[in-house]
Amino acid sequence: MAKLSRKNFFKGLALGTISLPFVIRGCGGENLAQQSSSANVITGKNYEWKMVTTWPPNFPVFGEGCTLFAKIVEEMSAGRMKIKVYGGGELVPPLESFDAVRSGAANIGHGAAYYWAGKSPAAQFFAAVPFGMNAQQMNSWISNGGGLALWEELYAEFGLVPMVAGNSGVQMGGWFNKEINALEDLEGLKMRIPGLGGKVLEKAGGAPVLLAGGELYTGLERGIIDATEWVGPYHDYKMGFHQIAKYYYTPGWHETGTTLELFFNKKDFDALDNSLKAIFRAAAAKVNSWILYEFETQNAIYLDKLIREENVDIRNYPKEVLDQLRIYTDEVVAELVESDPFAERVYASYQDFRQKATVWSKVTEKVFYNDIQI
Ligand code: CA
């Protein structure tokens, strides 16, 4: 990937309002068997589809994943399906992607389901909830644990077909100019932290602020905000936050494994022959893993850079602060579930899976990580 200067990076951040900040059902074989044999005939028809995204054009990892998706689909279909990818704002504003695909103005969208909380509160469970599941657990729940069927049911109401298509992995907790030693240190704190994480901060006495991505650097520099979260070491390094903030807090309790999505206009998707449907599902699966692997790779490299070259002071949120934020999260999620019957159904599935996955992880990985020296 070409390196972006900070200036160009900002320029690219047309999106801004929400944070930055999933699968393919089996191999598709069982679905194919249920469909009519006529759908198995390759028609030879050629398509030129439009894909809108919630990311600025060529946005590292997220946008690159969309370009990769289009390339794989075109190659696998031997040119029968060509996709033109539009960055946020190029065809429609980023947060109008959902409606653009519903209306048929575009055929495919790429984003994160929590952007559509206003359409359906339940959507957030398919992207991120504070103190939620990690990337591996989210992928497992959606793909093999019942999540996808609920997601498909939810999006079918909007005339869309969802597919899991990327994960940021766990994010970082954000950049601060004062230490967070106790819950009181969050009182009055003006922090850019969107979504449910912002609601949790509010319960702790903080003031979540909505600022466009391109305004974060100057906002923090000039004290318009006291703190900001963004993504992780790779994206945060490119934003230059280490030049103006003293402390880099971990973990990103508010985004523990943010899941990304593709969504298709259902009418357009259903009209495709089975070959193209299978290509889309296979390409989505490839991009789903590529995005996560790229995050893991670049975040590891850039965390090392931040520590060794920039001497960034990495701090852990104190346990008692995290414990209380988790209690507030339970309250926020309870209010969410109460407000929407479909959210209640999704949460029941999510929570059942999480509880079992957490025990499995505690018995194995946690023991391992506790005992290794870093
Ligand atoms: Ca974020």
Image: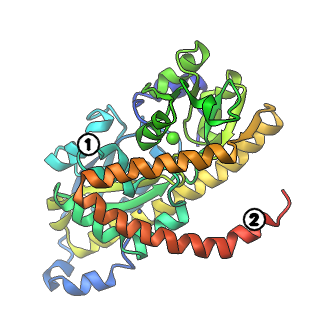
Q: Is residue 178 above or below residue 108?
A: above
Residue 291 image point, x, y percent: 52, 55
Q: Across the whole image, how many numbered discs are drawn on residues?
A: 2
Amino acid type shown at disc 1: Gly
| Most foreground residue, 250 or 94 | 250
Q: Which residue is mark 1?
A: 118
Res. 281 image quadrant: bottom left
| Most foreground residue, 351 or 31 | 351
- Give the SS element for disc 2: helix
Would residue 254 be visible to someone looking at this image?
A: yes
Residue 121 image point, x, y percent: 29, 50
Check the image and name the residue furthest to the top: 222
Check the image and name the residue furthest to the right: 373
Task: Decide if residue 99 is on the left or right side of residue 248.
Answer: left
Task: Decide if residue 344 is on the left or right side of residue 102.
Answer: right
* Disc 2 within 8 angstroms of ligand 1 (CB): no
| Most foreground residue, 373 or 48 | 373
At 29% from the left and 67% from the top, the residue drawn is 150
Amino acid type shown at disc 2: Tyr
At 26% from the left and 34% from the top, the residue drawn is 92
Q: Which residue is mark 2?
A: 369
Image quarter where the C terminus lies is bottom right
* Disc 1 within 8 angstroms of ligand 1 (CB): no
User: Which comes sooner in the sequence, label 2 or label 1?
Assistant: 1
Binning the other alpha carbons within 10 Å of mark 2 as few (below 14), some (14 to 19) or many (20 upward) gives: few
Would residue 79 be visible to someone looking at this image?
A: no
Image quarter where the N terminus lies is top right
- Distance from disc 2 to disc 1, alpha carbons, whole Å, reads 38 Å
At 61% from the left and 16% from the top, the residue drawn is 221
Residue 284 image point, x, y percent: 40, 63
